[in-house]
Image (cartoon, helix red, strand yellow):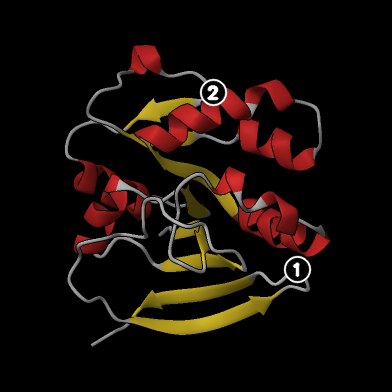
């Protein structure tokens, strides 16, 4: 049975929007090592449509740049989308067929490594409401973004258990959390 892990960049004021605009000054060897471990522990990516489209434009042109990029490009990707079809898929990706919740449960029931999910958006509400995420890695950056989409607005209170923290010299603190068991 696979584990679903979400990895999301968050500013101190709760923004998840356009992290490429505020997170790069903090990327260093510690950041890279942590991100690399997450990626190497996974054998597939789960992405929402918007994240898939952004990543599919950004990552393939970087092919051959380094091992991280090559692994990212080579991994199978599962995309939750009601608007994209298989004809739209490039970059080693497959659109999840049928009900998204059932499709993700099916992926989790398969043998294999971790399913790693990047990006936070509409898909997260569905994952959260259906108890599908096993572990969150929220990367808190020491920056105030000043606005933008917030981390899963409008949900019912959801209690999480702190499993671990990683603190980097750059000021990034990663909280590793899991849904709190009743």
User: Is residue 78 visible in this depiction of the protein?
Assistant: no
Dot label at residue 81: none
The spot of residue 162 in percent (x, y) is: 46, 84
Outermost residue toward the front in this view? 146
Disc marking residue 91: 2
On residue 170, which mark appears? 1
**Residue name at image x 23 percent, y 88 percent:** 182
Q: In this view, does 58 lie above or below 115?
A: above
The answer to which of 126 and 13 lies nearer the viewer is 13
| The one of 89 and 171 positioned closer to us in this rendering | 171
Is disc 1 surrounded by few (<14), some (14 to 19) or many (20+) residues within 10 Å? some
Q: Please provide percent x and percent y for residue 46.
A: 43, 43
Q: From the top left corner, tell me how far across and down residue 136 is, in percent.
A: 45, 67
Residue visible at 29% across and 84% down in the picture: 181
**Side of 68 relative to 116 (left or right):** right
**Along the polypeptide, which appears first: circle 2 or circle 1?**
2
Near-viewer residue (28 or 118)? 28
């Amino acid at each position: 049975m696979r584990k679903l892990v979400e990895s999301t960049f968050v500013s101190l004021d709760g923004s998840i929007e356009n992290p490429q605009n505020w997170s790069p000054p903090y990327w260093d060897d510690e950041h890279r090592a942590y991100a690399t471990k997450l990626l190497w522990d996974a054998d597939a990516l789960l992405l929402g449509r918007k994240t898939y489209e952004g990543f599919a434009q950004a990552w393939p042109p970087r092919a051959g740049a380094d091992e991280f990029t090559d692994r990212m490009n080579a991994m199978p990707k599962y995309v939750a989308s009601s608007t994209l079809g298989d004809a739209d898929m490039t970059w080693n990706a497959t659109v999840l067929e049928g009900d998204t919740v059932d499709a993700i449960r099916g992926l989790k029931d398969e043998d294999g490594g971790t399913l790693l999910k990047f990006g936070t958006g509409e898909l997260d509400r569905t994952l959260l409401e259906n108890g599908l995420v096993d572990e969150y890695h929220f990367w808190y950056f020491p920056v105030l973004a000043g606005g933008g989409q917030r981390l899963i607005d409008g949900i019912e209170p959801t209690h999480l258990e702190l499993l671990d923290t990683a603190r980097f010299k750059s000021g990034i603190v990663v909280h590793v959390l899991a849904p709190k068991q009743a």
